[in-house]
Image (cartoon, grey):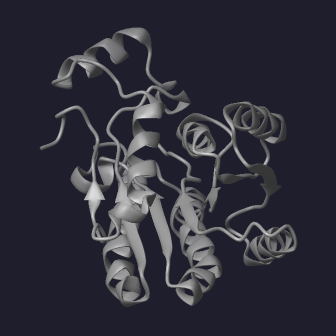
Amino acid sequence: MTVLVTGGSRGIGAAIARRFAVENMNVVIHYNQAHEAANETARSCMRLGAANVLTVSADVRSREQLLRMREKLEQRGMVPDIVVNNAGVAHYSMLADVTDDDWDEVMNVNLKGMFLCTQLFMPAMIGQRFGRIINVSSIWGISGASCEVLYSTSKGGMNAFTKALAKELAPSGVTVNAVAPGAVDTVMLDNLDAAEKVALESEIPVGRFAQPEEIASLVYFLALPESAYITGQIISPNGGWLT
């Protein structure tokens, strides 16, 4: 079994790659520019027991680059059975300050990138009548967030994509689900100072941020063969923040 994790060089993506590595799977770590971070994640995956590890670079906004990436995976015998669409960018600002370039950047990475990766890799899954597509969304795609209208919109679109495609692919044995985390202790929270982080944690019933490894465990569960009856779901590990 082979898993492809887009945006797998750091944070949640790296934790997901490591979780699959522990299970002796083939792990493909996609990145755009974070070459050394991707290599470090690859080395950790090898130490954890991955059968094979491959790092691949591509801009998820580019069909041409993703086609070249797919060709490389085909040549290496590592066409993914599981695709984790984790690559994404955040954006924090008032809607009045969002520019056309801001809009295009977030939508092209968060939505178009997911669309392209899914479209290019799902035919092999359909052909073998087994596959898992797992999209890493956000709690804000469910509830929305002030000053994150652009980001929330992109993740809401991801959730709708998940639900619709799940119905389309269900007869082919391919499940499509989304994991929509709450606040996770990654660089995504670096825009907050210490006091703001404490205030945010106080709003979460469990009293802390999630660790990337906790999100990775849920992604792994959804990829299991035993999870075949779970599809079209938006599952939000958020510590009780949103119920």
What residue is drawn where x is 76% and y is 52%? Answer: 32
| Quadrant including the N terminus | bottom right
The percent position of residue 65, horizontal first and vertical second, equals 80, 71
| Quadrant including the C terminus | top left
| Residue 22 in sight | yes
Q: Quadrant of residue 136?
A: bottom left
Task: Say whether residue 196 is left or right of residue 102.
Answer: left
Q: Is residue 169 above or below residue 2?
A: below
Which one is in front, 191 or 130? 130
The percent position of residue 60, horizontal first and vertical second, equals 68, 64
Which one is in front, 162 or 110? 162
Task: Say whether residue 148 is left or right of residue 33.
Answer: left
Which one is in front, 130 or 144? 130
Q: Is residue 203 above or below residue 221?
A: above
What residue is drawn where x is 75% and y is 66%? Answer: 78
| Residue 93 in sight | no
- Residue furthest left in the image: 243
The percent position of residue 132, horizontal first and vertical second, equals 48, 68
Task: Say whether residue 163 is left or right of residue 120.
Answer: left
Q: Quadrant of residue 160?
A: bottom left
Q: Quadrant of residue 94?
A: top left
What residue is drawn where x is 35% and y is 78%? Answer: 166
The percent position of residue 47, horizontal first and vertical second, equals 74, 30
Circle count: 0
- Residue furthest top in the image: 195
What residue is drawn where x is 80% and y is 56%? Answer: 56
